[in-house]
Image (tube, helix red, strand yellow):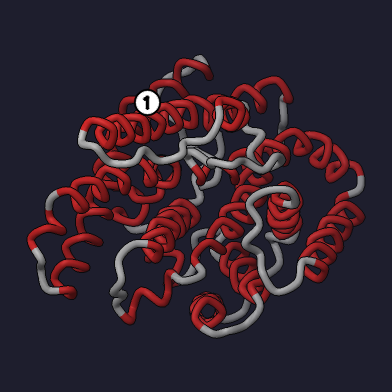
Amino acid sequence: MRAEIRSHTGLRGIAAICVVGYHQQFTGAYKFPWEAIFRRSYLMVDLFFILSGFVLSYVYCEKLDVRSFYRARFARIYPLHVFALLSFTALVLGVNALNVVTGHVAENVGSVTDWVGQLLLLNAWVPEKFEWNKPSWSISAEAFAYLLFPAVMAAMALRPRLTSIALLIGAATFYALVGTSLDITVGLAPLRCLAGFGLGMALFRYRETPVVALSGVHAAAVVWIVAALLLPVSDVLVIPGFAALVFTTGKDGGVIARLLACRPLHRLGELSYSVYLMHFFAGGLVGQVWTHGVQKMNLHVILGRSLFLTSVFVAVVAVSATTYRYIERPFQDLLRGRSRRVAMTASAP
């Protein structure tokens, strides 16, 4: 296994937390001014896609055994996906049962077909009436990229320059045609994934290109990303910032890369997949406690919002640390058939 790109792991952690923050935009009547950074943080999923293409190219650039690759991808994404879906399903059914017992109206939970479709990771392809554990749409889309990855890597080995150019043109074409919004979670969602994933693969092809004033480029990329998230501009304009940050941190050099690689952010990055898939469940638990308990205390709006957000983020990290330790890693080790000690974990989130 190749040495880990620690800054990319930390970057995944920040992106996952931003997605958690994005979904809190739909809760509560009051919002802090700084929450504006989360308003379009659904775009962090595109950062995940770019990171996946780059990191998987890095891991498998020297040797790719197709069977081992598919086994590793299955071990990486599917066990936690199933656990997250079952957990959220239990929460939804439990809340509905509580509503019935207390005389409230039960919520619509969709059909068995919707649930089975998500279990089989078809939810990025087929619209659902009830999306269950909604974040899994990106895992569904990325599974398609995994299917194509060995073929693209083979083409990259034979015609690296031509393949890289084709990937860049494909990504640019998608972003040019998609319009102003990248908030696509079904239908064209696999193409959204392929655009970012292919861009990441192409960026890796040029990884040896020297970058002058590396830390300055990092800072400019971060400023670009923040501006694109805050300003009323097309979603597509955030992509160059993501690409520049992923490309220039690919060797763990520069001030921003070292910051991303620090122990707290690196640990958050290790938990990022659990954070991403489990945050609907953890946030839902907090929401139920808040609705049926804390909210009745009539706290000041600022204090209430502060406590709510703190509770959500703490619960998400705590649940994610538990699932990472007892679900994600043990099942990876079991299905991959090797020890827990690994040098590289590659996936998105």
Residue 345: x, y in percent? 50, 38
| Residue 341 can be seen in this image | no
Q: Residue at x 36, y 74 (%)?
A: 35
- In the rendered structure, the answer to whether residue 30 lies left or right of residue 20 reads left
In this rendering, is residue 213 above or below 306?
Answer: below
In this rendering, is residue 175 above or below 139?
Answer: below
In this rendering, is residue 2 above or below 168?
Answer: above
Q: Residue at x 36, y 38 (%)?
A: 106
Residue 296: x, y in percent? 11, 58
In this rendering, is residue 235 above or below 224?
Answer: above
Comparing 162 with 254, the one in front is 162
| Residue 337 can be seen in this image | yes
Residue 325: x, y in percent? 31, 30
Q: Amino acid at mark 1?
A: Ile
Residue at the extreme left of the image, as rendered:
297
* Residue, disc 1: 327
Q: Residue at x 62, y 62 (%)?
A: 183
Comparing 319 with 118, the one in front is 118
Q: Quadrant of the N terminus?
A: top right
Residue 101: x, y in percent? 23, 30
Residue density around tag 1, few if under 14, some if 14–19, many if 20 or more, within 10 Å: some
